Amino acid sequence: MSIDLIKAHAYGNDFLFAPLDQTPSDGRARLAREMCDRHTGVGGDGLVLHTPIPSGSRMVLYNADGGVAEVSGNAVRCLAAIVARDRPELDELRVETDAGPIALRKLETREPRWIFEAEMPAPSGLARRTLEVAGAAVEVVQLSVGNPQCVVLGGPLTEDRLHELGAALAVHEAYPHGTNVELVEVVTPSHIRILIWERGVGPTAASGTGACASGVAAAAFGGASRSLDVESPGGVQRVVWEEAAIRLTGWAEIVMTGRWDG
């Protein structure tokens, strides 16, 4: 089986992209696991299967463990970079996802890097709750930004704490379909820092939807502004929480094109 393959990343959150019509319909989860393996495959946080539409592209996202995810802000931006490379006349484009269509506006091009503002889904189900994790009560903020998110405000941002809380909350019984997890520190009202545990992946250097969810949670319950910079290990993304949408600004970079002969 030979498949056209592109690798791209946004702030170190990396994805593989393959045409939907080149992949077997009954083996896509297995293909995602094989391709995303960092030792025996190409390596990535997820596999995006895509097909063109007049205004952009349609995508289906498989996490590295083979599970299907509704949306990824960084994967959407990476796919937009691929579309913008191949169709430079499109300054505004659309990526259709399982969480709905996302409109993007191209702000700047410095190949192999593109900067976009994306109109991400408005938050829903925003609420505080207390969960028991490893025998301790942990206060979290839960919401959806097209995919499920669980945010822990305050406390130290350490790898040990991320592995303890992120791993447990991602598969907590409160979230039967799993959830993404962020640890958040409010540095100033306009700047927060986060660490991410992504459902079906584990720790990631960045997350577009995680940045959106963290910004919303920090603004709603942590004293932050609704317009802020979100810093993760991979870099800083801009999040603006509006009534009808969350505007997410950042870059994506194409790093490889080739073929998979698995």
Image (tube, rainbow, N blue to C red):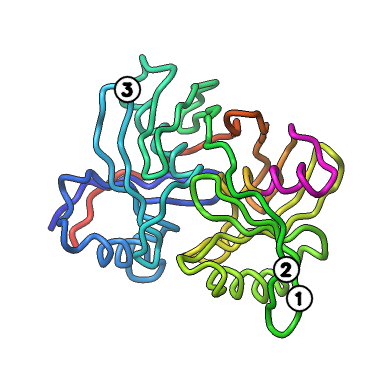
Instruction: Please state the extent of the stretch shown in magenta in the rendering.
Output: 214-227
Residue 108 at what x, y percent from top left? 54, 21
Residue at 68% from the left image edge and 53% from the top image edge: 127
Would you identify the image quadrant in which residue 247 lies? top right
Q: Which residue is disc 2 drawn over?
A: 130
Quadrant in the picture for the C terminus: bottom left
Checking the image for residue 220, the label placed there is: none
Would you identify the image quadrant in which residue 169 lies? bottom right
Q: Which residue is disc 1 drawn over?
A: 137
**Residue 71 visible at all:** yes
User: Count the marks: how many?
Assistant: 3
**Residue 249 visible at all:** no
Quadrant in the picture for the N terminus: bottom left
**Kind of residue at disc 2:** Thr
Tell whether 193 sits left or right of 123.
right
- Asked whether 151 or 184 is in front, the reply is 151
CB contact under 8 Å: marks 1 and 3: no
Q: Earlier in the sequence, mark 3 or mark 2?
A: 3
Residue at 69% from the left image edge and 43% from the top image edge: 216
- Asked whether 235 or 105 is in front, the reply is 105
Q: Which residue is disc 3 drawn over?
A: 55
CB contact under 8 Å: marks 1 and 2: yes
Question: For the residue labelled by badge 3, is the local secondary structure a helix, a strand or a loop?
Answer: loop
**Kind of residue at disc 1:** Ala
Residue 103 at what x, y percent from top left? 45, 27
Tell whether 153 sits left or right of 248.
right
Question: For the residue labelled by badge 1, is the local secondary structure a helix, a strand or a loop?
Answer: strand
Q: Earlier in the sequence, mark 1 or mark 3?
A: 3
List the single residue furthest toward the top.
89
Q: Earlier in the sequence, mark 1 or mark 2?
A: 2
Question: For the residue labelled by badge 2, is the local secondary structure a helix, a strand or a loop?
Answer: strand
